[in-house]
Image: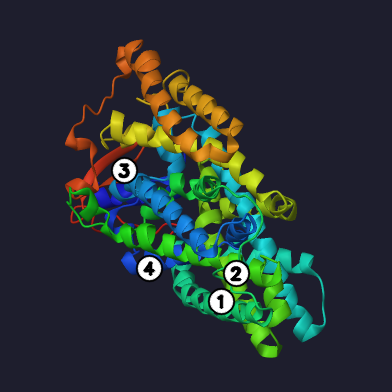
């Protein structure tokens, strides 16, 4: 039987650790280029809740220009961190939850992975709620019909169907939504600046009486993106990678534009608009501002663009990450489309309007535990394994990552302790959780695992045989728990269709 035949036979195989959409992506299953990935991140960056960060800054007495610069620098810092975790996707084609089997164990992965998955689902609910408010404004204009709850359900269903269609459908939407997002942002700025001028307010010299700490604003924005910082491999595993490129920067060149330019610039501008909105009207919510300032057809078009912005964010940043963690939880019974539906249901039932009322508290506490996961991931991938991960054993119950009954005590203790301490100092969560998780994990791995159980030594031995893209190869699943590294030419015809493509 040829390799292609074995791959096709294994296409729909399921086990306790294997399901098609969480298997490593092959070189031929990575359709997203540099510009496409950047468009996705323009869409992701326009989270309407971001407007509240900018408003909190100026409301706390920080000048508008300082707010914009602070948030741009915070996003540049978190973008640089994303570059580190992104390599897990570009090098090995792995999802976030599957990689966590290495530092946490094949069963232990579920605790930290689901903590991210549930938060992603909750963000889906928040974005859907804000989009539903905009849809309700359109419904009132055309139909005189007022029911945001109905639009909430309808909008959720449309997004679920779109995301369930796969990553190519997500990318197409992003390429349409990004220019629309830019358009709505430009309109909002000039409209709001005009409103401020009519009241004799100069937005650039406005000074509120609050006392917001720049460090708190900086860290809050990093916590805002701690979710995507740890699970960005879910997206980068679909980004085109130059075959056989060993240099980190060249291998990840299609990721740089998005993480180090599209994210910081877009996020800073959107937060700045929230600040301008607050200065001009006392309200950070752009939906309500648009409804108050727009008229007729222009109002409808602008509200439609708001909907599109929420939609493009939800696909990439919320539904996909949440769905993949649900698949990882029970791959025998949950496939990609089913998991997208499940993530959507969880998100719509989370009472997002209550979360929005306590946004900074929400950011601080989940950012604490997720930042600790980030530190553990970086320590495991770069410091312990030197990027050489035994991918086949990630899909074996009795392999290297079984540890103690499927749980790695070093990873779990480091996560709970680092996350708990960071949560106690929630205003500074990310800058505490990340380094503390990193250090604790390395120490505990050496004390509890590598020293006490020599058989658990890093089996890859830093061999290049445990690299993929750097060697011009892909991890190809042949069925029955068997993997083989193949070049693109050898795998030709093996890149079978997947539900998540």
Q: Nearer the viewer, mark 1 or mark 3?
A: 1
Q: Which mark is residue 189?
A: 1
In the rendered structure, which disc, 2 or 3, sits on the residue that comes first in sequence? 2
Q: Earlier in the sequence, mark 1 or mark 3?
A: 1
Look at the image and tell me whether residue 6 can be seen: yes
Where residue 24 sits in the image (x, y, percent)?
35, 47
Q: Secondary structure at mark 1?
A: helix
The reply to whether discs 3 and 4 touch (Cβ–Cβ < 8 Å) is no
Q: Are marks 2 and 1 in contact (CB under 8 Å)?
A: yes
Identify the disc placed on residue 36: 4
Q: Are marks 1 and 3 in contact (CB under 8 Å)?
A: no
> Residue extending furthest bottom?
296
Callout in the foreground (2, 4):
2
Residue at figure coordinates x 49%, y 46% from the top left: 226
Q: Is residue 323 left or right of residue 103?
A: right
Give the Cα separation between the discs numbered 3 and 4: 31 Å
Residue 63 versus residue 449 in the image, above or below: below
Instruction: Name the element at disc 4.
Output: helix
- Residue 285 placement, left or right of 139: left
Q: Which residue is mark 3?
A: 478
């Amino acid at each position: 039987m040829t390799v292609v035949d074995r791959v096709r036979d294994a296409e729909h195989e399921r086990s306790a650790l294997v399901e098609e959409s969480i298997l490593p992506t092959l070189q031929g299953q990575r359709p997203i280029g540099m510009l496409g990935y950047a468009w996705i991140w323009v869409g992701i960056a326009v989270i309407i809740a971001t407007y509240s960060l900018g408003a909190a800054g100026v409301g706390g007495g920080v000048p508008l220009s300082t707010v914009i610069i602070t948030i741009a620098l915070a996003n540049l810092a978190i973008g640089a961190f994303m570059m580190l975790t992104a390599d897990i996707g570009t090098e090995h084609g792995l999802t976030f939850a599957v990689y966590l089997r290495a530092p946490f164990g094949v069963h232990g992965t579920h605790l930290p992975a689901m903590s991210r998955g549930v938060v992603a689902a909750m963000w889906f609910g928040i974005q859907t709620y804000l989009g539903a408010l905009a849809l309700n404004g359109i419904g009132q204009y055309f139909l005189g019909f007022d029911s945001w709850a109905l639009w909430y359900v309808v909008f959720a269903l449309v997004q679920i169907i779109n995301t369930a269609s796969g990553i190519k459908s997500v990318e197409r939407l992003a390429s349409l939504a990004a220019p629309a997002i830019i358009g709505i942002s430009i309109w909002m700025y000039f409209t709001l600046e005009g409103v401020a001028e009519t009241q004799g307010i100069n937005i650039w010299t406005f000074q509120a009486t609050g006392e917001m700490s720049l460090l708190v604003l900086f860290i809050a924005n990093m916590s805002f993106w701690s979710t995507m910082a740890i699970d960005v491999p879910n997206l980068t595993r679909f980004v085109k990678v130059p075959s056989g490129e060993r240099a980190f920067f060249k291998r990840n060149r299609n990721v740089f534009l998005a993480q180090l330019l599209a994210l910081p610039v877009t996020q800073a501008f959107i937060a700045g608009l929230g600040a301008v909105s607050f200065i001009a009207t006392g309200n950070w919510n752009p939906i309500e501002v648009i409804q108050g300032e727009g008229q007729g057809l222009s109002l409808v078009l602008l509200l439609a663009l708001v909907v599109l912005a929420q939609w493009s964010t939800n696909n990439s940043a919320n539904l996909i990450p949440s769905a993949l963690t649900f698949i990882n939880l029970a791959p025998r019974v949950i496939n990609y489309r089913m998991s997208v539906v499940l993530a959507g249901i969880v998100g719509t039932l989370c009472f997002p309007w209550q979360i929005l009322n306590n946004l900074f508290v929400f950011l601080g506490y989940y950012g604490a535990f997720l930042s600790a996961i980030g530190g553990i991931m970086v320590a495991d991938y770069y410091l312990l394994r030197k990027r050489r991960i035994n991918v086949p054993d990630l899909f074996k119950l009795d392999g290297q990552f079984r540890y103690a009954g499927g749980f790695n005590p070093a990873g779990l203790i480091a996560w709970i302790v680092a996350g708990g301490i960071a949560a106690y100092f929630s205003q500074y969560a990310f800058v505490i959780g990340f380094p503390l998780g990193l250090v604790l994990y390395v120490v505990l791995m050496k004390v509890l695992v590598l020293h006490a159980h020599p058989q658990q030594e890093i089996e890859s031995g830093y061999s290049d045989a445990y690299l993929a893209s750097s060697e011009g190869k892909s991890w190809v699943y042949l069925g029955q728990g068997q993997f083989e590294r193949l070049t693109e030419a050898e795998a030709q015809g093996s890149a079978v269709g997947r539900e998540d493509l």
